[in-house]
Structure formats: structure tokens, C-alpha cells
Amino acid sequence: MKVVEINDVFKTYHDTEVEVKAVNGVTLSFEKGDFAVIVGPSGSGKTTLLNLIGGLDQPTAGEIIVAGHRLSELKPSELIDFRMEHVGFVFQSYNLIPVLTASENVGFIMSLQKWPKEKRMARTDEMLQSVGLSDRHKSRPAQLSGGQQQRVAVARALAPRPQFILADEPTANLDTKSAETLLDIMEKLNREEEMTFIFSTHDVRVMKRARRVITLEDGRVVSDERTNHHS
């Protein structure tokens, strides 16, 4: 089942006199259960492509269909609902809410989605356990290490059971042990919940785990290879 279809997508920025094609005629699709990474040098269009898939940005031309929705046809308010419903985001900078505890951060999107309280609490506990942080549910972000904050961010992204997770350089700020722990967790969730992951990364540790590696250069796909990594 295709979760994401990208058809001949362009994203052009006008930078003073120069036209920059951040994404330049990309056609790709992602299947349910993919564990895919998008790699390429800085400025190759990785983050732009993730933002387009997540509906955070609009293409200049071409079409993106996610979970059966044509993103170009959604109004801004519908896009917000669409993102909340279908997409889990994990950023390099964690983006946790500083005044909320780990539990409250994980439950945040579910509360926006009006999950009943008991269901939300149960899912929050389950997710904190799955990322190995059940003992830290009352901790605020400032009381957690970077690796722990990123695990809370992953738990938050996964809790509402989105159709897929977009992870932009999720291991960039982590030491090796924290990065490996995080990747183990994501692989396990990918396997057990058939969660689809799309990463953008420079990190070899992430590439080693991927089952599909898409390479971008100057906004174009130069290779798209499936690997045989099955852990």
C-alpha cells in the first residue's frame, strides 16, 4: 500500500536574482512499512522534500498525495488537521514543550485530537515504556539528556499512530549510544506497528539501518536503492 506518492514535484525559491530549484522534478513513492532514508550533500533538497511530504511547505509544481489526500487541494486549516491526523514529526532540535512533563509532551497531540483521557494515558505509558523512559514521566525536558529528549519526541510522534514518521536528522545531536538506542526503538516500532519511517540524514549510523536509501543531488533523485538490512 502506497502511503506517499510524489509526482514530478518542483520547489523553487527565488533568492535575490537567482532561482534555486531546491526540489527539481522528483517522482517517488513510499510503501507502508518502509524504513527509508534520504541522503545527499547539504543543499541537496532533503529537508525541503520532507517538509513538502509533511505539508509544511507547498510545491511550486507537481503533486503530492499522502494517505489518499491531494495536498494541493487542502485549505490551510485542513492541512493542519491532515498533519495532526497522519504525520508524526521528529526534528533535530527535539521541539519539546519546556513547561510540560515527558508524559504531557507525549500526550500533547493526542489531547489535541480529543482522545479520551484514559485511552490517552494508557497510550502515553505504553509509548514511554517502549522508548525506555517509564521512570521519567514526570520529568520536564530540562531535566532530561539530549538522547532522552529525542526519545520523548519519538514517543510523541508515534503515540497517535500516524500513517508515517518524518524524521529530519533525528540523531544529529546524539552521542553514539543514544543514537543506537533511538534507532533500535524506531526499528522495533517499524517492525511491530508497521510504522513507516522516512529520514533525512547525513548520519552513517542511520544509513546502515535503512532498508531503502534515496540519494538526492541538486534537488534530483540520483539513486533509489533497496538494501537487505533486516534486523
Image: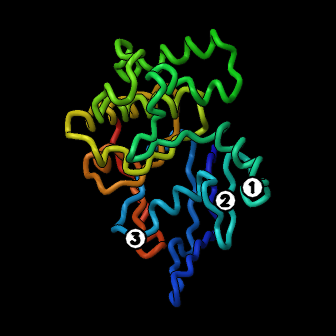
* Residue designated by label 1: 70
Q: How far apart are marks 1 and 3 (CA)?
A: 26 Å
Badge 1 vs badge 2, beta-carbon distance below 8 Å: yes
Per the rendering, the mark at residue 213 is: none
Q: Is mark 3 on a helix, strand or loop?
A: loop
- Mark 2 falls on what kind of element? strand
| Label 1 CA crowd tier, 10 Å (few <14, some 14–19, many 20+) | few
Estimate the x, y position of residue 172 in percent, counting from the top left: 30, 48
- Pick whichever, 38 or 76, lies toward us: 76
Residue 231 appears in the picture as rendered: no
In this rendering, the label closer to the viewer, 1 or 3: 3
Give the mark toward the camera: 2 or 3.
3
> Which residue is rendered at x = 74% and y = 50% of the image?
69
Q: Mark 3 points at which residue?
A: 43
| Disc nearer the start of the sequence (1/3) | 3
> Distance from label 1 to label 2 (Cα)?
6 Å
**Most foreground residue, 79 or 226:** 79
Q: Which residue is drawn at 28% across and 31% down?
A: 145
